Image (cartoon, rainbow, N blue to C red):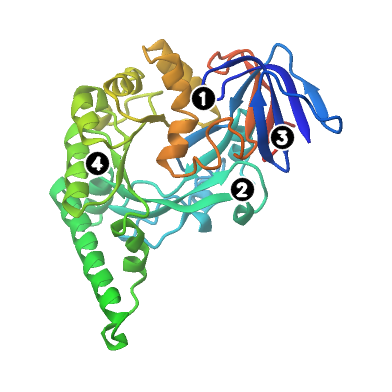
Amino acid sequence: MLAITNCKIYPVDREVIGKGTILIEDGRIVDVRSDITIPPNAQVIDASGKLAFPGFIDAHSHLGLNESCIGFEGSDVNESTDPVTPNMRAIDGFNPLDVTVKEARESGVTSCAVGPGSANVVGGTFMAVKTFGTRVDNMVIKDPVAMKVAFGENPKRVYSNKGKTPSTRMGTAAILREILAKTMRYNEQLEAAAEDPSKKPGYDAKLEAMLPVIKGEIPLKAHAHRSDDIFTAIRIAKEFNIRITLDHCTDGALIAEEIAKEGFPAIVGPSFGHRSKFELTNKSFVTPGVLAKAGVKVAITTDSPVTPLHSLPLMAGMAVSAGMEHDDALRAITLNPAEIIGIDSRVGSITPGKDADIVIFQGHPFEISSKPWMILIDGINVLE
């Protein structure tokens, strides 16, 4: 058993503990309180003057799919040969030995959602992984967590250059509606075949991959920057009665009340860097705070490698400097992303029963000069 004592604890799911102890056993959190009697056989780590947080989580990244320093050989983020590729799986392109995984881990990012980019209307499935390990199969928390879809400029640009649909926003929406309708019909045939095997349709890998979407098991993960694209994503989700997350949500501050009314979560960012295309005109660190104040469940994303994943706590700090409440910003890189991608039973807060993914800092992680003092993933100190 491990006991981390005398630290200020930010559990996220309840009040801050001014000076407390975290008990860990077999990779899980056993207890978190200010008045714990430490078992005599426990290894004790005195964290006096330190701050303890849940491991940070990014709900939208391409970590390990677009490797550093390589170019084409390490670029496995977009299968841009067909606008509909739901049968692509992030697990088959992820390289856990890329240096960016280590950099993310050493900044306190202990989990993230990883998946395809936005070249295709339907790109494939995201998974959730820990950022420690050498074999992706052993790093997976949950697979799949979402199906990537993209609106706006990117699929238009990729496929109009190939002389294929979509070359317009109408084309993107039409393609998505078509694959959703086909999947619903395929599912109806499968259900009918349970009583009459002769009615079973021929195997279709794309439709099989889409079944969890129309069954409500995973959401569409909708790349949408502009307000019109955000509303198209919502419109289609409501038409087919399916779940959706609004990823990037760059225009979110302009339509915050409408998004709050619809009840879909927003994964906001990357808010740092140059406005490299028209649909990023309203990119701002103000957006996550405005959405949170409106009542939207907000996660902050780096969209790694657009912004390196190890900058996630800094991005939250910049959102605070732009007006986001401190507690909202912390929740936006811990419990909110865990809930949005469906892994909150294991990570996202310092709660008994959850994985012992804990980051301990000297100073607050939103401050650029602060450094991790200890990083635990499944109760193992992974800070080299």
**Pick the front one: 43 or 255:** 43
User: Is 345 placed left or right of 48 in the picture?
Assistant: left
Q: Residues within 10 Å of mark 4 (few under 14, many from 20)?
A: many
Sequence-earlier tag: 2 or 3: 3
User: Is 270 placed left or right of 162 in the picture?
Assistant: right
For residue 338, above or below residue 79 = above
SS at circle 2: loop
**Pick the front one: 119 or 264:** 264
In the rendered image, the quadrant that contains the N terminus is: top right
Which of the labelled discs sits on residue 12, or is there none? Answer: 1
Separation of residues labelled 4 and 3 (CA atoms): 47 Å
Identify the amino acid type marked 3: Ile
In the rendered image, the quadrant that contains the C terminus is: top right
Of tags 1 and 2, which is closer to the observer?
Answer: 1
Q: Which residue is mark 3?
A: 24
SS at circle 1: loop
Identify the amino acid type marked 2: Pro
Separation of residues labelled 3 and 1 (CA atoms): 18 Å
Sequence-earlier tag: 2 or 4: 2
Sequence-earlier tag: 4 or 3: 3
Where residue 30 sits, quadrant-wise, is top right
